[in-house]
Amino acid sequence: MNIRDIDVNLTDEQKALRDMVRKFGAEVVRPAGIELDRMHDPADVIAEGSVLWNVFRQHRELGLHKMGLPKALGGMMEDVDPMSRLIVAEELGYADAGLSISLGASTMPFALCAYFPNPLVQELGRAFCEDTGVKMVGCWAITEPDHGGDWSLGGSNPRCAPSVRAVLKGDEYIVNGEKSAWVSNGTIATHAVLHVALDPSRGMEGTGLAIIPLDLPGISKAKPLDKIGQRTLNQGSIIFDDARIPSDYMVIPDPDIMTGVGMGEVILAAANGGMSVTFAGLALAAYDEAYRYAKERIQGGVPIFEHQNIKLKLFNMFKMVEAARGASRRMAMYNSVTVPPSAAHAVACKVLSTETAFHVASEAVQIFGGYGLTKEYPVEKMFRDARAAMIEDGVNETLAIQAADFL
Ligand SMILES: Cc1cc2nc3c(=O)[nH]c(=O)nc-3n(C[C@H](O)[C@H](O)[C@H](O)COP(=O)(O)OP(=O)(O)OC[C@H]3O[C@@H](n4cnc5c(N)ncnc54)[C@H](O)[C@@H]3O)c2cc1C
């Protein structure tokens, strides 16, 4: 990395963890990302034998999947401080943002298990911590084909109510509807955090939350989505056709609890917080590529770094990367130790980091000239990956309108 880490508080343990994840990122994640990105058919990304599974396996073997789970469930939460966790996200974002999101989403349902005392759910968290064979993969199923921005701005409007609906019958919920093709890991997930309408007359304020296995009768998946950026992140819809979900899996069965504990805000802060750190990592990666190239490429008889226009570009990129990185770290540290977290800061940092990643990756392409457009160099992929991030986990504009209410 060409930018020094000016965080004076980093301990030797944190630096050792950073170096270990950086090595994993450089030797395993980045090369796998390049290979997966070039696959023409997104079905090949998730096929048996795909290098994707090697990334997942090594991530588990390093224990990185259980950093957000408590010791009581076999996790490492108490031993891994918040700074260490965010360094891991930044490093993985640096290596490959799409794979970083895939690995992060894979832990989501299980990390949530810790917050609910129900033994069935706690057992899922425990089994996940032990799962080095990648038998369990999580996803976050919230958006729907007809409801994307509605999850940010729908409020109590019944016309914005989710179309995935759960109706309690005896000790089971009958669930119908479809989660969107955008569900990250939707094609490979074995478990999901599932947002459902319990009382559609209350719009988005009438929802509940379940943590469910996806092999229950009545649940099926669609084929993987084909898209321009983050092609390493598999995505696909999940369909519920009279699916029967045992009521113990409905961890928040009452919309009043959901709104009362501010669960929407907590999830928004967690998801956007992770995005901001990850895409600060991608921004840094694009800057590094451009810096290295500018020192090597000769035009006008000198390395292009010697030309003032390139110097100005690189300095501006450096300034933006450091602003996004610094703000994201500060926000992530605060939110990891504060209840309730600041969703306003998390969204601000998500917007800042993803816009920075997109701008810096675009400038990197410019610095590479024609070569920047080719697959010979990684910057065109970083540009595509960064573009997707401004829509991912909420369109930046809708998120900003939503978060303005938290100011
Ligand atoms: C890479 C990636 C990963 C993702 N991962 C997941 C995931 O893991 N799980 C999941 O469930 N979803 C996921 N999503 C879905 C993502 O959250 C949605 O795409 C996003 O919320 C936007 O929804 P939409 O695509 O339906 O766009 P729409 O909501 O249809 O928005 C279209 C346009 O209209 C604007 N708009 C929408 N509503 C309003 C309004 N009320 N007022 C003013 N303007 C409005 C938006 O700003 C946008 O410009 C992912 C998306 C991407 C790109």
Image: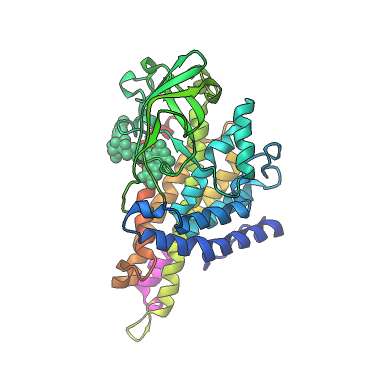
Magenta region, residue range: 305-316
Residue 150 horizontal/vertical position (percent): 35, 30
Residue at image point 52% right, 16% down? 171
In the depicted structure, whether residue 287 falls above or below residue 271: below
Residue 281 or residue 165, whichever sits in front? 165
Question: For ligand 1, which image quadrant applies?
Answer: top left
Residue at 32% x, 84% y is 300
Q: Where 201 sits versus 64, above or below? A: above
Task: Give the residue furthest to the bottom.
Answer: 301
Q: Which of 341 and 98 lies nearest the eye of the viewer?
A: 98
Q: Which is the main secondary structure of the residues drawn in magenta?
A: helix
Kindly identify the residue that appears in the image at 52 percent across and 23 percent down.
250
User: Does 71 appear in magenta?
Assistant: no
Q: How is the image coloured?
A: rainbow
Picture coordinates of residue 130, whole percent (x, y):
64, 44
The x, y position of residue 62, in whole percent, is: 62, 55
Q: Position of residue 54 (x, y in %)?
A: 52, 57
- Image quarter of residue 23: bottom right
Res 166 seen here = yes
Q: In the image, what residue occupies the spot 38% across and 59% down?
A: 37
The count of marks equals 0
Left or right relative to 82: residue 223: left
Q: Quadrant of residue 283?
A: bottom left
The residue closer to the viewer here, 174 or 321, is: 174
Residue 318 seen? no
